[in-house]
Amino acid sequence: MAGQFSAVNSSLDLVLDRINKLSQQLAETKAKVEVLDTPPASAGGRRAPGTPSAEELYNTAFGDLNKGSYDLARQGFDEYLKNYPDTELSDNAQYWIGESFYIQRKFSEAIQGFDKVLASYPKGTKRPRLRLKKGYSLLEIKNNDAGIRELRQLIQKCRIQTQFNLPRIV
């Protein structure tokens, strides 16, 4: 009788675990559908009715990133950039797209994402971090000369800033 009870408990634990996973997948799917059903912002910088605010889009995408839902996070950040390309967090959104690829060891895509930050947001706050990750990514794809050059440039800029007590401009 004790063995049967233990087997039932084990089976129940497996069923409950599966239900929890399915609930999480359902919530992620619902979030994806909501993003896809959201109309773009109207002209003039005003949001169309039902369009999430910049803060809502960014926070949702960042939450997905933290949960390890990297594809969903990238979709959210892409949507954010599509609707809000020139906000205080636009450079961060593009950075997190590159970072999500980096985390997944998709180094070529990460480099492209980081390059977009450098090109589109020359005064972005994540420049030192993204240059470091870009250098590492270049090394990972065996582009050693470019990777070393990127890391040396980062070190040089940091030395100049430290030597002359300059604000961070990397």
Image (cartoon, rainbow, N blue to C red):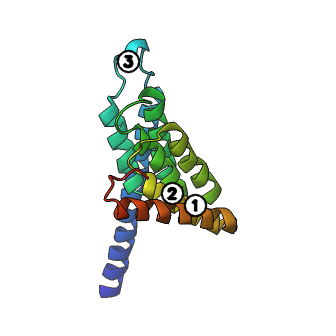
State the residue at coordinates (35%, 19%).
47
Task: From this view, report whether residue 45 is shown above or below residue 84.
Answer: above
State the residue at coordinates (48%, 52%).
70
Picture coordinates of residue 1 (x, y %)?
31, 85
Sequence-wise first label, 1 or 2? 2
Residue 150 is tagged as: 1
Sequence-wise first label, 2 or 3? 3
State the residue at coordinates (42%, 61%).
160
| Element type at mark 1 | helix
Sequence-wise first label, 3 or 1? 3
| Element type at mark 2 | helix
Pick the residue in front: 120 or 68. Answer: 120
Q: Amino acid at mark 1?
A: Glu
Task: From this view, report whether residue 15 is shown above or below residue 95.
Answer: below
Crowd tier of the residue under label 3, counting other residues whose Cα lies within 10 Å: few below 14, some 14–19, many 20 or above: few
Spatial separation of the CA atoms under disc 1 and disc 2: 7 Å
Pick the residue in front: 113 or 105. Answer: 113
Q: Quadrant of residue 44?
A: top left
Spatial separation of the CA atoms under disc 3 and disc 1: 37 Å
Crowd tier of the residue under label 1, counting other residues whose Cα lies within 10 Å: few below 14, some 14–19, many 20 or above: some
Residue 131 is tagged as: 2
Q: Amino acid at mark 2?
A: Arg
Crowd tier of the residue under label 2, counting other residues whose Cα lies within 10 Å: few below 14, some 14–19, many 20 or above: many
Picture coordinates of residue 120 (x, y %)?
51, 37
